[in-house]
Structures are given as C-alpha cells and as structure tokens.
Image: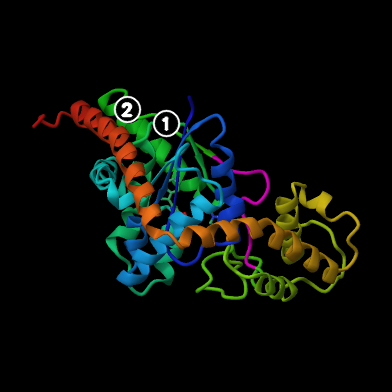
Amino acid sequence: MTRVFSGIKPSGSVHLGNYLGALRNWAAMQDGADTVYCVVDLHALTVPQDPAELRASTLSLAQMLIAIGIDPERSTLFIQSHVSEHTECAWLMECTASFGELRRMTQFKDKSEKAKFVSGGLFTYPALQASDIILYDTDQVPVGEDQRQHIELTRDLAERFNNRYGQTFVVPEAVVPAAGARVMDLQNPENKMSKSEDSPQGSVSLLDDPAAIEKKFKRAVTDSDNEVHYDPATKPGVSNLLSILGAATGQSPTEAATGIERYGDLKVATAQAVIELLRPVQARYHELAADPAETSRLLAVGADKARTIARATLDRAHQNLGLLAP
Ligand code: TYM
C-alpha cells in the first residue's frame, strides 16, 4: 500500500493556503493509502517561541487536523517531539547533506535575510524535514508548491545515503494539488499567504468567523482594469481570487470566472464559497476543542504507532551505516 506522510508547523493560525495547498489533500489521501500525519512542533523552534503559546497551538492544530477530516483511526496522527527518532535521524541527514545544498534552500535564504537572529536550526531545518519523511518509508508527500524544493532535497539525501550505504530509505515524491497549490496574500498578491501575524488582513484563518472572512475578501487588492479573467502575471490579485474560488468550488480558475463581471461580485462569491467550505470544519473544531483530554489520548496512540515504524527504519539505517549495535 502507498505510504503517505506530511507535516505542518504549529506556528500562527492555520490558514486557507495550508488548507487548499495541503490539508485538503491529506484528508482525501486517506482513501486508498496508509497515511501518516504529523504536527511538526520541533520545526517551530527555529525561532524563539512562547512556551504556553506553543503548547496551546500544537494541541489546537492537532484538533484542527481532525476537524478537517483526518481520522485518527485511519491515519497515524502524532506530534513530532513525541517520537524522538525524528531528531536522531536528523543527525544522519545533516551528515548526508552538504553545506552548499542547505545554503541553496530558498526558504532558508528568504527567512535568514529577514531574521535578526538566524539559528543553526533554521539552516539544518530541511535535514529534519527529510528525516520526518524517510523514517516512514514514504512514497508520497502531499504539500503546497513552496515545499517542493525541500522534497527534492529529501529525494537527493535518500538516494545519496542509499548509494553510500546500500538500500535503506524509500525515495519519496511530492504531491502538489492542481488547484490551490500556491494561495497568495489578499493584500500583497505577489506574496504567498502566510501566518496571520505577518499579514492580518491578507491571511484567512480557518477559524475566522463569516463576518471576518467577508471583510477580508471585500478588501482584497485587485487592479484597475475591471476585467474578471485569470492571468496571474498581470492580474495577481484577481487571479488569486479566481484560484481560491475555483479551488473552493471544484473548478479551474478560468471556469470560476464564468458569469462574473464585476470585482465586487467576484469578492462576494469567493467569500461565500470560503465561508461554506469552512463552516463544517469550524463546527467540528469547536466540539473537539471542548475535550482536550480525548485529543491527547488519540495523539498518544498515534505516537506509539509512529514510533514503531520510525524505530525500525532508524535501526536499519544504523545497521547499514556501521554503527555498533548496543
Ligand atoms: P507549513 O507548516 O509552512 O505549511 C503546511 C503546508 O501548507 C502548505 N502551504 C501552502 N499551500 C498553498 N498556499 C500557501 N500560501 C501555503 N502556505 C503553506 C505548505 O506547502 C505545507 O504543505 N516545512 C514544512 C513542514 C514540514 C513538512 C515535513 C512537510 C516539516 N516536515 C515533512 C512535509 C513533510 C512547513 O513549514 O510547512
């Protein structure tokens, strides 16, 4: 059976880009594959975190994953720091990656240019991400467009390790959705949608209420030529709205434009589609949020299942590397 793995960081609120680019696919892939999903709390530590906030957002994100349809009975759902094999394997991947390879990662370049304090972890982050993936003999990794380069690196590292030490890791491939793979910021449509703290009006949180969603779409940046058609190069704002509307209603962006003449109508239609898409997710989330003990129980079961798979892979890697068995 195909093994699927993916992860999401518990920093800031989960947004529409996460949902359309990745999470929706996570839920869909549960049919017909063996799916393993992880809240990657250790990846959030590349920048200093408030401990209480980190703890709360990790639990809340796990609840959101269940709310969007990740079924802990069908999928292995767990928290990265609960399975210490991830950090153990990260060292093996750091020793497999070259300095130049890590330096070329665009996410590292972008983030390190902006940050005042650049941690060592920000630099080695993709080695931990590679470990997350290869520990589960992963065939497919559902992600948004921005993660493609990290998955390519994971492939290179797995192949290099296999060439040096014999067949050890499965070489995974990225699965990027046809629609919604790169949702842009509503205020700066040249930038991808990111955490709401960075762009409060440009990012739609999965927990925004209908009034907030409507307001954000009404204020979305468009352009001045008043023509509703899809052309990301010259009309980034309008094209982003069409992509979101299409992704939310199961159409291509061009199909989504059919019958819409005015920007105001496009904004209202997109807001309505997103509100309807999120309505059941939000209802389910609020139910789950009322019972944190049950979520913790489910996550402990998930960590046990994950550890069994990860340990076997890591033992195989140790053996092939020539580490002396204890
Ligand atoms: P993260 O937490 O930033 O994002 C989680 C997922 O959401 C996708 N995404 C988007 N898709 C479309 N439009 C956007 N504007 C948008 N913003 C985010 C991301 O592509 C991602 O799929 N490094 C990863 C987390 C990670 C991981 C892994 C992923 C750690 N280990 C192993 C896959 C496999 C990250 O920071 O994603």
Badge 2 element: helix
Q: Is residue 286 inside the magenta stretch?
A: no
Q: In the figure, 170 relative to 106: above or below?
A: above
**x then y, percent, for residue 157:** 36, 37
Q: Does residue 115 appear in this view?
A: yes
**Residue at screen point 81% across, 53% down:** 256
Q: Which residues are magenta?
A: 175-185
Tell whether circle 2 marks a residue whose Cβ is less than 8 angstroms from ligand 1: no
The residue under label 1 is which amino acid type? Val
Which residue bears the numbered disc 1? 171
**Residue at screen point 56% across, 37% down:** 29
Q: Which SS does the magenta portion mostly show?
A: loop
Task: Please tell me how many numbered marks the rendered image carries.
Answer: 2
- In this picture, residue 249 sits left or right of residue 177: right
Q: Residues within 10 Å of mark 1 (few under 14, many from 20)?
A: many
Badge 1 element: loop
| Mark 2 vs 1, N-terminal side | 2
**x then y, percent, for residue 219:** 72, 76
Q: In the figure, 135 relative to 254: above or below?
A: above
Q: Does residue 144 appear in this view?
A: no
Which residue bears the numbered disc 2? 162
**Residue at screen point 28% across, 40% down:** 96
Q: Residues within 10 Å of mark 2 (few under 14, many from 20)?
A: some
Label 1 near label 2: C-beta < 8 Å?
yes
**x then y, percent, for residue 192:** 59, 62
**x then y, percent, for residue 65:** 50, 52
Quadrant in which residue 242 is drawn: bottom right
Who is closer to the viewer here, 38 or 157?
A: 38
Foreground mark, 2 or 1?
A: 1
The residue under label 2 is which amino acid type? Asn
